[in-house]
Image (cartoon, rainbow, N blue to C red):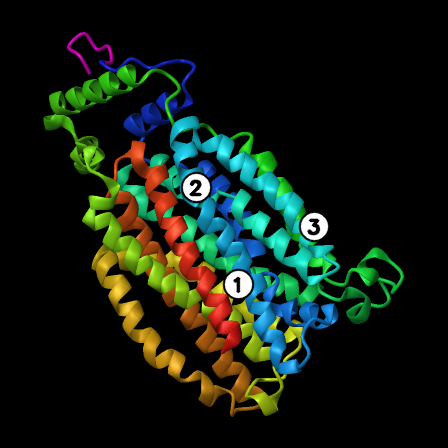
Amino acid sequence: MAENGEPLIENHDNCEACKIEEFKDSNTGIPFKLLFFVWVITLAAALPISSLFPFLYFMIRDFHIAKREEDISYYAGYVGSSFMIGRALTSLLWGVMADKYGRKPVIMIGTMTLVIFNTLFGLSVNYTMAISTRFLLGSLCGILGPMRAYASEICRKEHQALGMSVISTSWGIGLVIGPAVGGYLAQPADRYPNIFSKTSVFGRFPYFLPCLVISLFALVAFIISCWLPETIHTHSEENIARDSLLRKAALDETTHMSNRSEKIEDSELRSPVSKRSLLRNWPLMSAIMVYCIFQLHDMAYSEIFSLWAVSSRRLGGLSFNTADVGEVLSITGFGMLFFQLFIYTWVERILGPIIVSRIGAIISIPLLSSYPFIAKLSGLALLLMLNSASMLKNVLSLSITTSLLVLQNRAVAQEQRGAANGISMSAMSLFKAVGPAAGGSL
């Protein structure tokens, strides 16, 4: 504040980003409403990614493209990979567009893409249509990168870990609840003959119902995205630079009256990193590299788990049906939600994001090694061990992902976050494209 009590920073009435900055400067609280919107939109983007895994095996079988039962997983892997290949090709472009034209337009385009192409995937009548719709869904839905940047921009720096936690929680729950939706709602004419007849659209397209439900939820996310305030300034770059300097001056002038949280925000305004090439930004690139490795692992695990669970006992599986898989994943989803909302931020505050990632990686090794032994169990022992292992595995994965996202967004300034997250998404998608193909072949 100036001595006359007037603010040094000129706020532009037509700029929503200025209003967000003003709110962060004057309010130390958490923007719960905006974080809830972020949670819903991210969940809508995550649900279609893994919702197909419980029924993909049966969908490929119904296409009659595999000559042997053992080849079904091979073809299924390429359907799963097509989404990630499409996303890898366009994520950087969507990130750059989000930096230039705003987060909101990219998010709105992405949510509408979910509505259209996820519905078309459920109506697939052959293998080519299934791969094509999944590829277009991945390439035209550039939501996740801009949403990461958006979550960090609506929060003060001391709350950015919570913002990233909301993203990763919603994303992780979507990757778990998605298969549950697919497992419970696929083939409804066979599972619920009293409600759905064989001659209805759900009887002729047995995998349409789960896709339709997810698309309707994506439509709700699209409506919500229309009310999102933009975080990219709409006025000239000169005014943005001037306002940033004035804001820094205002904070420096009132340092002796500032509390600890204001000092943290002041440090965020010093942005020498904004002039650094993203590819030469080692904190960013190292976090992206580790992130990609873990995402490759997680994607392969997500597909292998579902295929392993529905495979016959003679092939080393569990002989589960889609509902059994959905039940396990639903329990896992609730465990993840509880951990991320009530435990993760406390653990991250004590240990820091790097230590959390290291501990999660170390524990994952013996945990995954236990799955072949779990397959030898039966009855109640099998259900207890399987649900415990699945919940712990996904909690560890979610903790690692959240910690790495925090590191990535802290490594760059606001004007580069869209592009930085675009690079992260493109690289991660390439690794994830390898995951389903390799996992299905294995």
Within 10 Å of disc 1 (Cα), the crowding (few <14, some 14-19, many 20+) is many
Q: Secondary structure at mark 2?
A: helix
Which segment is the magenta one? Answer: 1-7
- The rendered magenta stretch, by its main secondary structure, is classed as loop
- Per the image, the residue denoted by label 2 is 147
- Left or right of 67 in this view: 227: left
- The amino acid type found where label 1 is placed reads Val
- Label pair 2/1, CB-CB below 8 angstroms: no
Q: Is 60 part of what is drawn in magenta?
A: no
Name the image quarter holding residue 262.
top left
On the image, the x and y values in percent for residue 205 come to 78, 60
Q: Residue furthest left?
A: 256
**Coordinates of residue 142 in the picture (x, y in percent):** 49, 43
Residue 279 pos. (x, y %): 24, 45
Q: Which residue is mark 1?
A: 176
Point out which mark residue 120 bears.
3
